Image: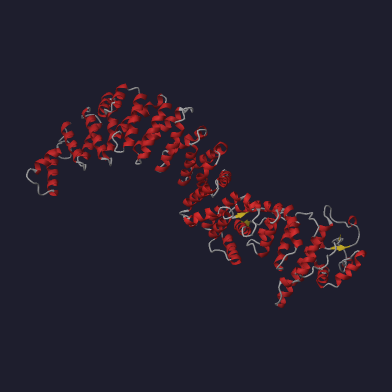
Amino acid sequence: MEQRPPRVPKLAWVEEEEEGPGAAPEEQPAEVEQFQLPQEDAALDRTQEQDGAHGRFRRAAQVPAAIPSWAGLAVAAQPSTALGAPHGTSLSSLSFVLLLVTCKFIECVWQEETSIMGTGSMENCDVYSTDTSAAMLDLLEGESVSSLEQVPAMVRDIHQWLMANDSGEQSLDRTLLELAEAHPADVGITLLRVAPSCDRAATTMWKTIMSSPMTAEPALLLLLDVLGSWPEHSTRTSDGDNTDVFALAATVVMWKILQVPCVPQAVTVYLPRLFVHLLFQVFFSTGEMPEEVDDLWRVCRKEHGLPTNPSRFALQTLRALLCLEYEDMVTAMDRKRGWDALLCADTQHDAVALLAREVSCVSIPLCSGIALHLLGLLSAEEPRWDLPALAFLVEVLECLDLRECGGSVVEISSKYLQSERRQMRRLALRALLVLRDDPSMAERTWSLTESLVKLLWDTDGEIVGMTLVVLGFLFLDKDILVSSPIALQLAEALLPLFENDDNQVQRLSMILFREMMDFLAEEGEKHVQWSLLPLFFRCHDENRHVAWASWATLLRATEFLKRRDLTKRVEKQKLWMFAKCLLAVDRSRVIEYVRRALPYLYSPQEFLRRVAARFIVIAGQSLTRQQGAFGLICQALEHMRRDVSPAIRSLALQTLFALGIADTGPYPLVQRLQDQLRRAGETRPRLPGLGCLRFWSSVWR
């Protein structure tokens, strides 16, 4: 092993006296005083002059005739109190400043010479050679930095030294760790700026920082801040540099850290937060990225041979993180092709839900940590990653203690219930559905009633169905007092849902309407009155669950209205007697009843059309030709005459004769019957025997 050169003694510096603007040229010093060594070190000086590397270092230090005047400090052997150093600046820091400036000057000269000669490189420059670096690091050993502005410069030069040498010095590790412990933000941010692609030297520096528990945790927290700020993180270091650092650069650093044989304990401690941010990196990098990030990615690919897709690289890093403790879960996601689904924008939502379920199967503490971190992130104003965050949170909510964080879930759900994005509304409702299992959540969720009522007008049947379930959970809690205005708004929103295309929505809306009547005051009597007719028709629905819910709600409505005559008929399930009684007692509403019954003539259910036709016949018998609904009945019967059901067509003809309006249509009834027979004959040209009579008789049944 090569023997390290002798230690360079610490140097004392005095500040060069500044010249005034009017000084004569001959008064300026012709040259800067040379380094002066203490007398007791004369023997050591002779030894150093015989060493080539340190001779070059001394010659380099004697060059600064062109160094700026702020660093042109002469060497003297006087005590430190007589040097005239700037107030608050230590001698060691001044010596290091001049040392760095000297190195930069030599570097510039070397670059200029090699560019003219066309040969050489910085790696061959004496300033960055191994021996010179060792001598310069000896000067740093034991010194402290008195000014924060020096930290970024020191980090940059340490990085350059490592790039010029294949192996670092132990003193470099100690110096870097001391800097990182005292100034973690400056060191980490500067390193991300000077080497965003995490080259060989930067990798060595990050591994050194992560090797000590005192520096690993602050550095990891810094990386987490950068990872959470896509695409770049804005901050200012002590030297005034405010250049943004990219989240992708922090991802590359994490990938390198996860490859070391012994991963720092801090990575395990902060695994939930790392998981969340790396998962979001997959989402962000799936879409279009800024040009600066694309440029950085090309450099990273060339440096480390990474995948062509940055989202696949982020996923690769996430998998490496999970493999630290949950390799079985990673394998399960592979088997279900969940990782591939994460890389596709169309399937990411489902893939996140699958990943959340897999995580909940292997570790409840991990789920709890992830969920708590997501709750904190979602509390911010409209984060761009709210969709995957809420999708994951909904799947792992059951792992949380809702007594402690249920309020936060309600607040987040309230924010997204009125979102313009349908998926966000669905996820917010799913979160509330989880809360319904906890009775203590009813009072907190009640504040969302108004927002939930508005969702009943949504065009998405799934959203309406979930909203009905949540509202039903609230109204079943008899300890909560519901204000009459909210109950009226709910009644108005529920009535149209009786005719929803979804049977589940129909049934839930009827059940909720039945429960809601307990909170209605006299102002709600009108809404209950108009619910009687649709409930009567839905009692004949072909879906038995809808039919039963309609019957139970109809019975409760008649009790609310205190209509004992109607209640008796509903109880005995004499529904046609109920209809006749309703029309006979509420004659002022007959016309409106007819209008509300007309849509049922177009129902896809044949039995409902027959019920509507019969109801209109009963209503028509109580009307005169002068009343406004009579024309509506004629139009309805004309439509019934063209129905595909023979029973309905027959009923329409019977009704026309019964009402005495057989010849009031566009053309006489006889002609219409003849046309009907002719069309039947065209479709059935050969009627056996008495086929025509049989057909005629079927029309009148």
Q: Position of residue 683 (x, y in %)?
A: 14, 49
Q: Nearer the viewer, residue 496 or 139?
A: 139
Give the total number of marks visible in the rendering: 0
For residue 44, which quarter of the picture? bottom right
Q: Hey, which residue is sitting farthest right in the picture?
A: 39
Colour option used: secondary structure
Does residue 530 appear in the picture of this structure?
A: no
Q: Position of residue 514 (x, y in %)?
A: 38, 30
For residue 628, which quarter of the picture? top left
Q: Looking at the picture, does residue 487 appear above or below residue 195?
A: above
Q: Position of residue 42 (x, y in %)?
A: 91, 67
563 sits to left or right of 411: left
Q: Looking at the picture, does residue 183 appear above or below residue 400?
A: below
Q: Nearer the viewer, residue 258 or 385?
A: 258
Q: Looking at the picture, does residue 234 appear above or below residue 438?
A: below
Q: Looking at the picture, does residue 490 appear above or below residue 644?
A: above
Which residue lies at the image location 49% right of the left edge and 40% below the top edge? 434
Q: Quadrant of the N terminus?
A: bottom right
Does residue 466 appear in the picture of this structure?
A: yes
186 sits to left or right of 73: left
Q: Nearer the viewer, residue 371 or 450?
A: 371
Q: Position of residue 422 (x, y in %)?
A: 45, 46
Which residue lies at the image location 58% right of the left edge and 60% below the top edge? 293
Q: Hey, which residue is sitting farthest left in the picture?
A: 689
Q: Nearer the viewer, residue 126 or 324?
A: 324
Q: Quadrant of the C terminus?
A: top left
359 sits to left or right of 539: right
